């Protein structure tokens, strides 16, 4: 799939690190380092603008290493970029650790996954079909 992209950053375009990678790393595009205090959040620009085909979305997801090692994650994970959005890709980061975290220009802050999606058409009914599970949710199937 080919996707139009404008890169206003000084960084290389996102790319897949391995043949089996689902996501591409997004890099912070900053004029100066930014400090995220504990429980602080910030929208971090990437300098990237994309044009997705209709029927696709770009999902902004956390980087597992940044989350596990530093407590930094994407607040609205996964963030959705719709096919008709033409603004800069921004990443809403939050610091869930007890220590300040400094975001450096060019740092890999999130990953981007391109995904096909369907559009739903609602069919209003008075009742739904029955299943063995029924209304059970929120851990009703057990923990083991």
Image (tube, grey):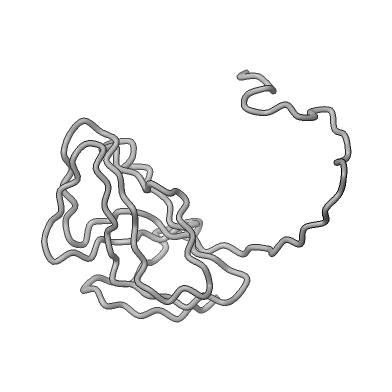
Instruction: Give left or right: position of 122 versus 5.
Output: right
The x, y position of residue 143, in whole percent, is: 61, 19
The x, y position of residue 73, in whole percent, is: 34, 44
Report the front residue among 85 and 58.
85
Please tell me which residue is depicted at 26% across the width and 52% down the height of the picture: 42
Q: Would you identify the image quadrant in which residue 23 lies?
A: bottom left
Please tell me which residue is depicted at 33% across the width and 36% down the height of the picture: 68
Instruction: Give left or right: position of 21 versus 140.
Output: left
Q: Quadrant of the C terminus?
A: top right
Please tell me which residue is depicted at 51% across the width and 79% down the height of the picture: 2
The x, y position of residue 75, in whole percent, is: 38, 46
Report the front residue among 6 and 23.
6
Instruction: Give left or right: position of 53 versus 133.
Output: left
Labels in figure, total: 0
Instruction: Give left or right: position of 91 versus 32.
Output: right
The x, y position of residue 34, in whole percent, is: 15, 53
Q: In the current view of this chain or complex, which residue is farthest to the front?
A: 126
Q: Quadrant of the N terminus?
A: bottom right
Please tell me which residue is depicted at 34% across the width and 72% down the height of the picture: 48
Report the front residue among 60 and 37.
37
Q: Would you identify the image quadrant in which residue 66 lies?
A: top left
Q: Would you identify the image quadrant in which residue 138 lies?
A: top right
Report the front residue among 115 and 81.
81
């Amino acid at each position: 799939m080919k996707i139009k992209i404008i890169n206003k950053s000084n960084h290389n375009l996102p790319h897949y690190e391995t043949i089996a990678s689902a996501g591409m790393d997004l890099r912070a595009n900053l004029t100066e380092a930014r400090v995220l205090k504990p429980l602080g959040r910030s929208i971090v620009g990437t300098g990237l603008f994309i044009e997705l085909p209709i029927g696709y979305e770009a999902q902004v997801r956390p980087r597992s290493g940044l989350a596990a090692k530093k407590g930094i994650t994407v607040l609205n994970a996964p963030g959705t970029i719709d096919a008709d959005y033409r603004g800069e890709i921004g990443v809403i980061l939050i610091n869930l650790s007890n220590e300040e975290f400094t975001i450096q220009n060019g740092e890999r802050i999130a990953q981007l996954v391109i995904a096909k999606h369907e559009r739903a058409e609602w069919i209003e009914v008075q009742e739904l079909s029955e299943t063995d599970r029924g209304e059970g949710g929120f851990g009703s199937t057990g923990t083991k």
